[in-house]
Image (tube, coloured by chain):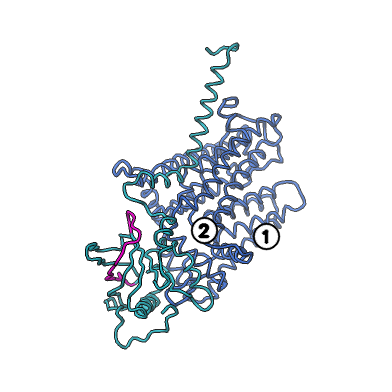
Amino acid sequence: MRNTHIFRLFGSRPTALYFLSVWIVAIVSSIWWLTPSDDDGYYVHQIFSFIEFGTIGLFYIETFLKTFVGFPGYPAVQGSFFVLWDAVGLPINLYTYKAFQILVMVLLVGLSARLVFVLTEDQYQGSDDPDWVRTTAWARTSFMLVVLGISPFLIDTLFMRPEPAGLLSIVLALLAFRRCNQDGARTALWAAITGFFIGAAAIMHPTFMVAGGLVGLSLIGFFLKRRQYLHAVLGSGLALVPIAAAVSWFLANGSFAVNTIVSHYTDRAPHFGGAVQNVTSMIAEPFANPTMASLFFSVPLSVLAIIVLLVVGLLIWRIAQPALPHGWRHGATPIGPVTAVDVFFLGALLNFLLDSGGRVQILTVLGFAASLALATALRSNPGPPNNPRSVQT
Amino acid sequence: MRTAANPAPRRAGSIVTATLALALATAMIGYVPLSHILKHVVASEPRYHHFVAQREVGEQVTDREMVLVSPDRLLFPFFDRIRSQFQPGGPDRPAAYVIFSPNFFDDSMSAKVIADFGCALDARGGQDILWGILFEYVKNVDRENGRAIFEVRTLLGPLVVDFQFDEILYEFYNGFFVRGSVLQIVAPTLGGGTHIAFPIPDGTVCQPQADG
């Protein structure tokens, strides 16, 4: 594949930037093409609640109530954003109410592209063919941007939902973790930042307690394995800061708050295989009931199924080979060649397998994690042996 | 012919391949936006669009009218009213209420909110109501006589509304916005039965209504 025309086309910087531009246009124009959802209505109330009352709640008829059905991370961060937005005199209306979500989405897609690019550069650090490394990095970036579009990721992420903010926290954590692995004086600081973002993801949505939690545990294991005890302590400690803040919010509001959140998620008790069954039937739905809606969901779910199987296959293949001829030998987790991106994918997959129904929100996270994992796992041509300093995230 | 001396066909083929590959990749990134846009183009009945609703309903609503929506997604043509509800001193116009999101309360709070709703309607005699509702919450519509029965969900059970409408402001394939009056509401009770929540029963004590 090294010299194919398509590889060179997708492996060029202008092509990757073009795909990124298409993403940005799609995200920003969602103000027009995407009609608001019920979640939008719920979170818009919380924006105004945060601006006017400094808390998370909504009006029902004449009664203002604090709400405890969701984790407080997303409404608090979004509310703070709009407090500043409002303070500088910008309007909040039908055209601007999604400003925060759009900003998060643009950052998420842009930084994910950056993550794929730098991980590829790291993987082939020390190569005697830097042009080829750069082409591979851009090709992987382009591939990730394209696959992400046709995965279920975008189905639900442009509504006001906490998943993109959680994913952005994870991507920021992975970028910070990469800095931990580079030579420098402040690696412990980057470990602390990594931990903070993993903790921040956990308070956005329960999905990230599983997927992000697994990443956190693997990184602690990595630090301990390398005897970086300070890094492990700082990372764990900073991860607990946002979590402690969220727990305090519930406890400070008494038993009603705690009972509400507990009963809300008790209704969603894990049921192994329920989501798989549901997704399989949604993929097959157009054959039994060929409507636009069934086709709309079937296509990205089919793509997701293929990506997930590919990534799982690649992971098994990699684990089965203790020392691959190039790359991966310095995987930054205690699990040999399994990288932190892979761990995040496995966490998202576990979350999906445990979900009772395969709700779209869980599929958006799995779609993102699978696209990222596949893009970073792809290889076009054996490169030179890894530089010993090179560490996969 | 592909020869080193005549590379033009090869170059043309490459350009075609590259263009097709880029077009396909662009379509893949745009899959979700293009699907949403396409549904408005090819659908036999009009799909709901918030900017159309803003024009057809949001700009037509009068200062006297109370806005009710079921569910939240239909709230957006009345954006200014959402915020005014939260501002100090209460709304200067009738607010826009979601009737009801079942997740947010326990049973006793649901009963209180239903009672408050009856009082808010009573303050205006059930008149001057603009209700946006999806057909999944509409049990029956008599278009000739302008009557509809709504059945919206609450945590306690279904809330049945007898609604008389004078005008349909905006209709789409799975819902409409209607202007009219609430005639009666039969609501669930904490004990598992039902009661008439509007007109409010004699002896009911209501809080002063900010938008009365």
**A111 shown above or below B206:** above
Q: Main secondary structure of the magenta part?
A: strand
Work out whether B163 lies above or below B197: above
Q: Amino acid at mark 1?
A: Val
**Is B205 left or right of B195, judged from the image as shown?**
right
Magenta residues, start to end? B156-175
Count of marks, rendered view = 2
Q: Position of residue B72 (x, y in %)?
A: 41, 63
| A383 in magenta | no
According to the picture, the residue beneath numbered tag 2 turns out to be A162
Tell me what hue chain A is rendered in: blue
Instruction: Give residue A127's position: percent from left, percent from top.
Output: 70, 32
* Chain B colour in the picture: cyan
Question: In x, y percent, where is residue A79?
Answer: 57, 65
Residue type of the residue flagged with mark 2: Pro
> Quadrant of the image for the C terminus of chain B?
bottom left
- Looking at the image, tell me whether mark 2 or mark 1 is earlier in sequence order: 2
* Chain of the residue on which disc 1 is drawn: A
In the rendered view, tell whether residue A390 sits above or below residue B20: below
Disc 2, SS = loop
Q: Nearer the viewer, mark 2 or mark 1?
A: 2
Residue A213 can be seen, yes or no: no
Q: Is residue B171 magenta?
A: yes
Residue A322 visible within the image: yes
**What distance separates the C-alpha of mark 2 from that of mark 1?**
28 Å
Residue receiving disc 1: A233
Residue at image position (40%, 66%) is B61
Secondary structure beneath dot 1 equals helix
List x then y, in percent, for residue A102. 55, 53
